[in-house]
Structures are given as structure tokens and as C-alpha cells.
Amino acid sequence: MANTSSAKKAARQNQKRRLKNLSRKTSIKSAIRRVLDALDEKKFDVPKTQELLSDVAAKLARAKGKNVIHANTASRKLSRLAKKVEKRTQAS
């Protein structure tokens, strides 16, 4: 346990940051899941899926800028997801 007042404050700040980062990561995972679910639907809606993909891109960019996730991780996730969307778009 922290003894000094500055260490106690740092512990409080770390807790707040941890919860915020966890929320951001969960939000990204949920957004990715929504895109993947849209790809699996029988009635594939291209504009809806593109909108969901742009939402994922925004969330990844925000998390990358806040150093929640590594820049290459964000790029990789977006690239793989965009590739899946493009493949499904070409098929339908």
C-alpha cells in the first residue's frame, strides 16, 4: 500500500486510468463484434457495414492516440477487418 501522499494520489490516478482504458478496449471489441455480426447476416447491408467499419476506425484511432493500444495493433485490426468487409462486399 502507498505510504506517501504523492504515492496515494498516483494510485488513485492509476485506478482511474485503468478503468478508462478498460472501457475503451471493451468499446473497441464491441464495435468489432458488431461489424463481424453484420458480415454474417443473411441480408448483407453494405452502407450499414461501412458505417460500422468507420466507427471501429475512429475508436481505434482514438485508442492509438491515447496510447491505450499500440499503433501497429490498431492498424492490423483495422486492416484485417476492412479486408473481410471488402471480401464480403465483392461476394454480394
Image (spheres, rainbow, N blue to C red):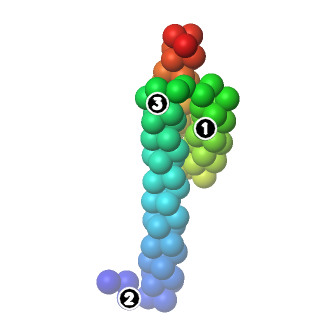
Q: Residues within 10 Å of mark 2 (few under 14, many from 20)?
A: few
- Name the residue carrying label 3: 41
Q: Residues within 10 Å of mark 1 (few under 14, many from 20)?
A: some
Mark 1: which secondary structure? helix
Residue at 44%, 88% (x, y): give it: 4
- Name the residue carrying label 2: 3
- Along the horizontal axis of the image, is 28 left or right of 2? right
Q: Is residue 40 visible?
A: yes
Mark 2: which secondary structure? loop
Between disc 2 and disc 3, the foreground one is 3
Q: Quadrant of the N terminus?
A: bottom left
Q: Is residue 32 visible?
A: no
- On the image, the x and y values in percent for residue 61 come to 63, 41
- Name the residue carrying label 1: 52
Vertical placement of 72 versus 68: above or below?
above
As drawn, the label of residue 60 is: none
Amino acid on which disc 1 is placed? Leu
